[in-house]
Image (tube, coloured by chain):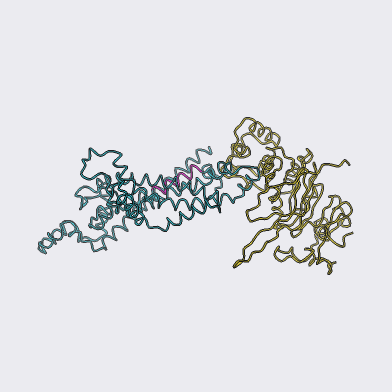
Amino acid sequence: MEEKKVILEIENLSVSFRQYDKGFGKTDLDVIRDLNVTIHQGEMVAVVGSSGSGKSLLAHGILGILPYNGILGGKIFYDGAELSQKRKEELRGNEIVLVPQSVAFLDPLMKIGPQIRRGKKDEASEKKLDQIFKGYHLEKEVQELYPFELSGGMNRRVLVSTAMMGNPRLVIADEPTPGLHMKMVRRVMSHFRELADQGAGVLLITHDLEQALEVADRVVVFYAGTTVEDADVKDFAREETLRHPYSKALWRALPQNGFQFITGTQPYVKDLPEGCPFGPRCERFCEKCRGEIPYRELRGGKVRCLYAE
Amino acid sequence: MKKSMNKYTTIKNVGKQGIRMILLLICVSIAAFFLVSLSPVDPLQANVGQAALGSMSQEQIAKLNSYWGVDEPPVERFLSWASDFFRGNMGISLLYRRPVSEVIAVKFANSIWLLGIAWVISGVMGFCLGALAGMKQGTWVDKVIKGYSLLIASTPAFWLALVLLMVFAVWLQILPVGLSVPIGMEAAGVTLADRVRHAILPALTLSITGISNITLHTREKMIDIMESDYVLFARARGESNWSIFKNHGFRNVILPALTLQFASISEIFGGSVLVEEIFSYPGLGQAAVTAGIGSDVPLLLGITVISAAIVFGGNLIANILYGIVDPRIRKGGAGL
């Protein structure tokens, strides 16, 4: 297999929020502590984590749209060079694009056409949009509608269309299929697969492992602010090929593998244990797990566990 | 088909609002009428004067009372007043000795200048300042605008009027102290410039106090918009601050601002009562005060009902405009 170029590399990314307590004290709330993801051209990588684990902040961090009190740590490299805030502002919307969750991310008072064109009225943008719409089988009349007038099926295609207005080389899809039935999910996912096959890197952020396994090339498992495993989709065929106990637990929770669940819940960022975040729920937990756990290479993937072999 | 349906709903809505307005006016006039009838105002004394009343015999007083219907029960008196009012006869003003409708028309023509200028200035300025502060939330621009608005919001209008009067009319002597036209000038000789010069100070007072409310509301709304998902997405798509304002901020903030602007008629109207009194500006507000103090019941009732109608009219326009401007309501969708 030929080596494809790395389009996005995220090293030890952290996102924290400064909170002011009573008096003059302040605490930094680490929502993302240690996140590592690498995406190659033409590759679709899914970051899978449970709801409310701060996955969306990953997307916001890459695009430079964190709220003013959000602090970004770690390093992000895009296309070989570090992605500074200035570079993010230049690239977002053109080379780096976001596909949001729902039409709630569209201005309710702006017609679809002008909105996708970002208010531009020149001939080139109009032509481009017409072409994109044709590609997604959307009538030209849809451009004259307001977001609330779109049908469920149109919604997704319109949202994907917004990404196509630029020349996307990195597509970030943040939970693009909430509450959709499987047939619809497959159709939406096929749009992203298409983008990846055309050479763009696709970062799919989702809580749905099953969905991720269907379309993605690699899956990064995200637990309590840390990436615990980076595995090829093939590794999810059997429990034994997986590396981290949490990934194995996720595997066992899949319907076809017995719907088994483990006890306990994901800890809230404020009550994280020292060392391994999964420690309190892990069978093999021991004193050593309270220390620093390295993110290491293992069998072609990566894992953040002392015992994985 | 769908369009005509929507037109039908719009007409139905306007009709509903119209009925509501009539009901409101009936309620307001009933309340006003009975409050006056409970007050110590003696219609007879107000009409003939204290001195004349003192020199009259009990017999004459009783005769006059029954002639004017003072001894009739209040409900009957109200009904006879209301039925005349409904036919356009608002009665005769005791103080001006002219039909109430005429007095109100003259006073209203004076006030409309003042109110109109103040309404437009406070609306436009309030909107601009509020939108700017909301876009730049947390910066010094926002802090200055917010500070100013809070300061002005807690300043009584009459006090501000007195300060302006002292500064511009007494110390600097560049603007007149009061009235709506120069003293001792023939009505024919009054120019538009004269009228404007006399309206500047009262209009300024009303504008300054009106701005703060609109600014604070617009700012709050703008902050909500800036924190919305669609602005976040616009930013993610590389839109600049100006583009975000042009495409999303303005569009979304103008709707609540319009509503606010028309609803603020009531506040400007209320403020004008005090301000006109201080500047001796012969408008509707001053007439209301004069009528109240001078026991001019017909004029007072007339002004009350007309003011209620104007204020309600403002709200009515705001409601109708909302339906026309907002596509979610106009196109008859699920709404918000």
Is residue B336 among the parts visible in the rendering? no
Q: Is residue A3 left or right of residue B198?
A: right
Q: Is residue A218 left or right of residue B242?
A: right
Which color was chain B given?
A: cyan
Instruction: Find the magenta span and give its range.
Output: B313-325
Question: Picture coordinates of residue B182 (x, y %)?
Answer: 25, 44
**Which lettered chain is shown in yellow?**
A
Q: Quadrant of the C terminus of chain A?
A: bottom right
Is residue B85 among the parts visible in the rendering? yes
A288 or A168, which is in the foreground? A288
A27 or A253, which is in the foreground? A27
Q: Residue furthest bottom?
A: A287
Q: Quadrant of the N terminus of chain A?
A: top right
> Which residue sits at x=63%, y=32%?
A126
Please, is residue A114 above or below residue B131 in the view? above
> Which residue sits at x=45%, y=48%?
B126
Q: Is residue B164 left or right of residue A187?
A: left
Indicate yes or no whether the magenta region holds residue B320: yes
A170 or B8, which is in the foreground? A170
Please, is residue A280 above or below residue B178 in the view? below
Indicate yes or no whether the magenta region holds residue B158: no
Name the dominant secondary structure of the magenta segment.
helix
Examine the image and state in which quarter residue A114 appears.
Answer: top right
